[in-house]
Amino acid sequence: MAALIRHRSPNAADVSRQQLKRYREVITLWLHKRDTWEISQQLNLPESLVAGWVANFRELVRAGQ
């Protein structure tokens, strides 16, 4: 069953390829108990983008269980 991904960054169409390449780093840092603000500062990404990716990842994990 495909996961319904509701949480998207408000500017998802504006995500650059360079930013998208940081997705794995964002999730890895979040899994190591980092805050979304801290991750956004460390990787120089908008916090809304980081929070959206984390929300999507959490939903995908829940859908896969």
Image (spheres, rainbow, N blue to C red):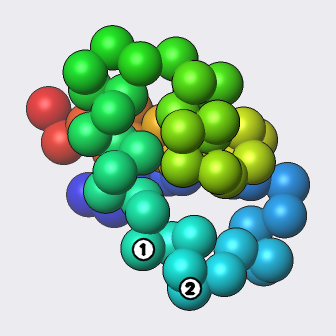
Circle 2: residue type: Arg
Identify which amino acid the numbered label 1 is placed on.
Lys
**With 40 as the anchor, is 28 left or right in this view?**
left
For the C terminus, give its image quadrant: top left
Q: CA distance from mark 1 to mark 2?
A: 6 Å
Residue 6 showing in the rendered view: no
**Position of residue 47 in the picture relative to residue 11 (left or right):** left
* Residue 10 can be seen in this image: yes
Q: Decide: few, some or many residues near mark 1? Use Cα within 10 Å; few <14, some 14-19, many ≥20.
A: few
Residue lying farthest to the left in this orientation:
65
Residue that mark 1 sits on: 21
Q: Does 25 appear above or below 54? A: below
The reply to whether discs 1 and 2 touch (Cβ–Cβ < 8 Å) is yes
Query: Camera-side residue: 57 or 47?
Result: 47
> Helix, strand or loop at disc 1?
loop
Query: What residue lies at 66% left-to-right and 81% top-to-bottom?
Result: 16
Q: Residue furthest bottom?
A: 17
Q: Position of residue 6 (x, y in %)?
A: 64, 46
Q: Name the residue that disc number 2 marks.
A: 17
- Where, by quadrant of the figure, is residue 59 drawn? top left
